[in-house]
Amino acid sequence: MANRYRTHNCGELNSRHIGQGISVAGWVNRRRDHGGLIFIDLRDRSGLLQVVFNPQVTEEAYRIATEMRPEYVVRITGEVARRPPGTENPRIPTGEIELIAREVEILNASRPMPFPIGDKSGIDESVRLKYRYLDLRRPQMQQNMMLRHSVIKFIRDFLDARGFIEIETPILLKSTPEGARDYLVPSRLYPGKFYALPQSPQQLKQLLMVSGFEKYYQIARCFRDEDQRADRQPEFTQLDLEMSFVDEDDVLDLIEELFTSLMVEIKPEIRIVKPFPRLSYHEVIERFGTDKPDLRFGLELADISDIVADSEFGVFRTTIAGGGTVKGFSVPGCADYSRKQQAELVEFVRTRGAKGLVTMAIEGEDSSADLSLDKVRSAVTRFFTLDQVRAMVKRLHAGPGDLLLFVADKSEVVNTVLSQLRLEMADRLGLADFNLMVFAFIQDYPLMEWNKEGDRWDSVHHPFTAPRDEDIPLLDTDPGRVRSRHYDFVCNGYELSSGSIRIHDSQIQEKIFKLLGYSGEEVRERFGHLLEALEFGAPPHGGIAPGIDRFVMLLAGEENIREVIAFPKTKSAIDLMTNAPDAVSEDQLRELHLMLRGVESQNFP
Ligand code: ASP
């Protein structure tokens, strides 16, 4: 690698190089003056190297070293030496050696840093994002970017070896419905017309199947103008994938093999569960209250409506009589929760939409078969018979020492709230193992759900998802009961991707568009190309699109996808480094045939 600047990378030097003359180049990570000697930790992408400037060795280099400040860019030539005994640093790979500088050149100076390169704690994220190019110098960020690179390279190699080809699709496109708002780009050449940035290459990958490519993938950028969260960005990256002549299991088997081998190769220290569980939508909602369950721990929900429907407890009874549900779960070892702790849990469920929370602490050490009512600490014990309490305890697989938590409401509310309370309790008890990733597939979703406000059906996934063959007749009679060929891929409580076997019959596709409330004209205008393509010998096909950012975030042990994206936007969709979005000139607007109406240029919040 020797060139004008360097013969070696800092981090690759070790005791084998002792006695050799070498050159290195990089950034001054730290400078220490020590009784007539100057020490510098020099940093390049590969790591740190200690450099010693001794005026007895060379006065000139020593003098230059006195001028060096953090983040100066320097080139240093010298000799690798063993560190004096007792001064080794076992925490860094080059800790046994140091470079005795003989010649040094300052290649560039640096202004004082807005924050120290090193630990990110205590640094406001907005400062990090404004100076993202400096933030990215931090070793943690460098590791995250390299991890991301390794993941993408692994995916490319894996799919290439299995006959997939990578095909790029356009960014300037027509609106594709994926359930979010589009980003629009005005056309200069065609006044009043707009391109839409793709929410995903969904239709294009299907068209590539019509073209006969059979196995396509792309590391694709997707754009969705929706409210931001820690795991969302206005633009994000998917492994977009599509295959012809496949059923669900073909796609899921491929994804299982890809993610298994990827984990073994890239993060062998993280355990996974094989085979990946394949669970039905109905089952996960019952057991975990959500279709993206964290399967690293139990705390499973159970429905006790049948047990308490005739109890003396009015809240449970009337909820069930009104069509609602009572569900709960048992938290091991929390029977000694104080009033204050229980009040916190009540507050937790209230702020998430439940009216209240019923708690029951099972005291004592006897087995639950011997349970008596005086062992049940709860404000509502008196409303239940011993048999009812025993049945509840049994249904929740609870025992002495456990705290039982119940919510009564409409089933959507019960599930949403309890799924969050389940995560909260797991967090409090430290049940989620950071060295475990439990991947799972969720299947058997309904195809459509009724949208009351819109007075129409909405796709649960997207409108191109195929219904189960045997349910096709129900499209005419009872669309809400049609099961779809959609699957989700989840891990540790995150949705990594959705996918499906697609509709390849234009008549069924047209029927679905109609059910979704599109008029004949809208269908022709928005989807005419797809419907037409399906009439030219479209093969059966299906695919999936795992989110790369979210997956790398999990692998990196980060809690925010911004940590694994080089230049992300803030939660309010702003690029703080370049100040985008930004106003444009009158000329630009005129060229695009645009006029701003009632908009005052707004400063960022
Ligand atoms: N295009 C879909 C999405 O972005 C994924 C797929 O169905 O393959 O969610």
Image (tube, rainbow, N blue to C red):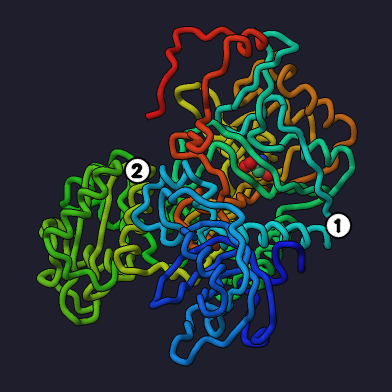
At horizontal 63% and vertical 30% (from top left) the residue drawn is 177
Whether residue 405 is visible, yes or no, is yes
At horizontal 21% and vertical 65% (from top left) the residue drawn is 389
x then y, percent, for residue 417 = 33, 48
Q: Is residue 321 left or right of residue 344?
A: right
Picture quarter with ligand 1? top right
Please tell me whether residue 173 is drawn above or below residue 386 in the rendered image: above
Q: Amino acid at mark 2?
A: Val
At horizontal 63% and vertical 7% (from top left) the residue drawn is 590
Q: Secondary structure at mark 2?
A: helix
x then y, percent, for residue 155 = 72, 59
Where, quadrant-wise, is the N terminus in this rendering?
A: bottom right
Q: Which residue is mark 2?
A: 413
Of residues 67 and 267, the one nearer the viewer is 67
Whether residue 147 is visible, yes or no, is no
Q: Amino acid at mark 1?
A: Gly
Q: Is residue 462 left or right of residue 86?
A: right
| Residue 111: mark | none
Farthest-out residue, bottom: 85
Where, quadrant-wise, is the C terminus in this rendering?
A: top left
Mark 2 vs mark 1, foreground winner is 1
Q: Earlier in the sequence, mark 2 or mark 1?
A: 1
